[in-house]
Image: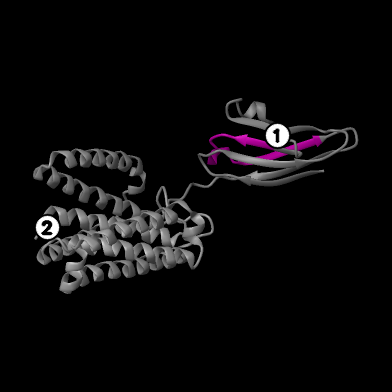
């Protein structure tokens, strides 16, 4: 039995024809193109034949073009019978598709991605509201402000830091923890509260005017970067390797700043950190939007919101260090 299964014909690309053949005794196989042997029509560099163990024969033709359109014939013969089957191949130009904001793969579509984006930014808004709400609470209630600046408050800061590290790595390193409901929401809530306490305590050492200025600049920068990332055609996700190198360089520069106690170096470090995490925000935004070289699965809304949250918090911290005045 000879059955011609399917063809994929795209102009300028590799074309494959698959045929499943069974028979006893084993048949001989001949391929023809417009009733002429393939050896005459194509040279050895333009086509190849492959016989697989599951009785499938594959004909591969390189660089198919519209001018080469015609009929492919396969003839199968043994002592018992002779059979042939054929198919007409035509080539189409690869159409240019204009995409407004994403070309999604697998089973995803734009509707699913839009729901995913709304979910991510809804969670992010809740996180930011809690965090900056705690910052405001620590500033406008004197008793709380004095407590977080006391030795007891500092111990609670280190406790919050440990809790943050544990929950952060649990969400980042464990896909099950990041996707399993309601565990993912519980871990994210604990992380947000611990980070909110740390941000509140850090900001309590700065003047309220400095904190408000840092919040305003952070909001302006994040909004601008997000809008730019949504509409630009440039693929920031292809720069992940460069960002890793920049992060290591910033880390090394930060270690130098620790031992030099130079205000100028601290200012440069804070400025570079704000720029770096602004780029991270652009990359993470495009990972969430999709349609670029890399993208986040629509199942990872908790992980996606965590990425944006950490980008914004780091931008705020660096800007506060850059422009803030301590009391």
The C terminus is located in which quarter? bottom left
Q: Which element carries disc 2, helix, strand or loop?
A: loop
Foreground label between 2 and 1:
2
Question: In the figure, 252 relative to 117: above or below?
Answer: above
The N terminus is located in which quarter? top right
* Label 2, residues with CA under 10 Å away: few <14, some 14-19, many ≥20: many
Residue 106 in sight in this render: yes
Q: Which element carries disc 1, helix, strand or loop?
A: strand
Residue 235 in sight in this render: no
Left of 109 or right of it: where is 70?
right
Looking at the rendering, the stretch of residues picked out in magenta corresponds to 58-76
Earlier in the chain: of badge 2 and badge 1, it is 1
Residue at 18% x, 42% y is 258
User: In the rendered image, which residue does mark 2 sit on?
Assistant: 324
Magenta stretch containing residue 35, yes or no? Answer: no
Left of 157 or right of it: where is 175?
right
C-alpha gap between disc 2 and disc 1: 78 Å
Say if mark 2 contacts mark 1, CB within 8 Å: no
Q: Where is residue 132 in the image (x, y as percent from the top left)?
A: 24, 68
């Amino acid at each position: 039995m000879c059955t011609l299964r399917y063809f994929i014909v795209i102009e300028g690309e590799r074309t494959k024809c698959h045929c499943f053949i069974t028979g006893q005794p084993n048949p001989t196989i001949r391929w023809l193109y417009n009733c002429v042997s393939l050896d005459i029509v194509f040279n050895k560099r333009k086509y190849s034949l492959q016989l697989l163990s599951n009785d499938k024969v594959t004909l591969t033709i390189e660089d198919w073009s519209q001018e080469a359109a015609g009929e492919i014939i396969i003839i199968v013969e043994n002592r018992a019978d002779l059979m042939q089957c054929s198919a007409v191949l035509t080539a189409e130009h690869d159409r240019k598709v204009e995409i407004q904001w994403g070309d999604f793969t697998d089973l995803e579509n734009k509707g699913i991605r839009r729901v995913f984006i709304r979910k991510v930014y809804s969670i992010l808004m809740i996180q930011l509201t809690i965090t900056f709400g705690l910052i405001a609470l620590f500033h406008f209630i004197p008793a709380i402000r004095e407590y977080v600046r006391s030795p007891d408050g500092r111990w609670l800061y280190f406790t919050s830091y440990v809790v943050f590290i544990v929950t952060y790595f649990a969400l980042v390193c464990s896909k099950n923890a990041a996707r399993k409901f309601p565990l993912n929401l519980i871990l994210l809530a604990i992380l947000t509260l611990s980070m909110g306490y740390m941000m509140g305590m850090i900001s309590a050492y700065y003047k309220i005017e400095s904190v408000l200025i840092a919040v305003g600049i952070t909001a302006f920068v994040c909004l601008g970067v997000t809008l730019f990332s949504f509409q630009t055609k440039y693929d920031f996700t292809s720069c992940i390797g460069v960002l890793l190198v920049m992060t290591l360089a910033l880390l090394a520069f930060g270690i130098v700043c620790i031992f030099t106690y130079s205000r100028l170096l601290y200012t440069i470090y804070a400025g570079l950190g704000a720029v770096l995490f602004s780029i991270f925000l652009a990359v993470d935004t495009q990972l969430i939007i999709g349609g670029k070289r890399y993208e986040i699965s629509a199942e990872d809304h908790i992980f996606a919101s965590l990425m944006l949250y950490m980008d914004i918090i780091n931008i705020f911290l660096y800007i506060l260090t850059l422009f803030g005045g301590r009391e």
